[in-house]
Image (cartoon, rainbow, N blue to C red):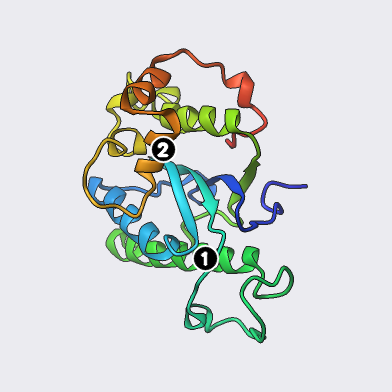
Amino acid sequence: MKQYEVPLETGKYYHIYNRGINGTNLFFEERNYLFFLEKYSFYMSKVLETYAYCLLGNHFHLLVKVKDNLNLDLTDFKNLSGLNTGLNTKNGLHAPDRLVSKKFSDFFNSYSKSINKAQNRTGGLFETPFKRKVVNSDTYFTQLIWYIHFNPQKHGFISDFKDYPYSSYQSNFSNKLSKFAQDQVIDWFGNENNYRNFHTIAHSEKNINHLTIEF
């Protein structure tokens, strides 16, 4: 099954990746990173729990869970037809996969329109469809958090990924109210010290090659 054909099912965890069309930049100014996160939170927080993210020039990585109960207002999907039964039905236009994908589409379109206006550009910004892989074990969930945070160092954006400002590594220490699941991530590792220590260990990407997504 291709990476974009994996269904987005309620209660499951996913590594999600996308990049600019033909590798073009997604972020042109520093303020674009915060704007991206604000848009992402606005469109996706109803359907996803977000455990890790990293924004890197022309692409981004996410570690998410599709929420168990998609308590959504059907007006969010007014452009879809045939929504005649409950949201948790497994098939059809109202299946979780279609609902979450529609939210991603709205998010990408909204961000793209704003960037196009600011950069005086036209056309699509994101490649479609976005890529995703199921995360199906505790070990890989933990190592994928490290991998996503390590990406800026891997791609040469910075010498130490822990100093990179556009990932969830540092934001997980924040006391600010957030729609991201930073408390759950810290609790997953036991406490902040364990979280920091895990990120100082030299991990092998080979252990999670089947979960990583790169072009």
On the image, numbered disc 1 is attached to which residue?
Answer: 105
**Going 64% across and 34% down the picture, which residue do you hit?**
137
**Going 68% across and 46% down the picture, which residue do you hit?**
3
Above or below, 76 against 123 in this view is below
Label 1 neighbour load within 10 Å: few <14, some 14-19, many 20+? some
> Which image quarter: residue 198?
top left
The residues tagged by marks 1 and 2 sit, at their Cα atoms, a distance apart of 27 Å
Q: Position of residue 150 (x, y in %)?
A: 43, 26
**Mark 1 residue element:** helix
**Going 74% across and 71% down the picture, which residue do you hit?**
91
Could you tell me if residue 122 is visible in this image?
Answer: no
Residue that lies at the very extreme toward the right in this rendered image: 1
Residue that lies at the very extreme toward the top in this rendered image: 202
Quick one: quadrant of the C terminus? top right
> Which image quarter: residue 155?
top left
**Going 65% across and 44% down the picture, which residue do you hit?**
134
Left or right: where does residue 68 sit relative to residue 178?
right
Which amino acid type is shown beneath numbered disc 1?
A: Ser
Above or below, 183 against 104 in this view is above
Left or right: where does residue 151 sit relative to residue 42?
right
On the image, numbered disc 2 is attached to which residue?
Answer: 185
Q: Position of residue 20 (x, y in %)?
A: 48, 49
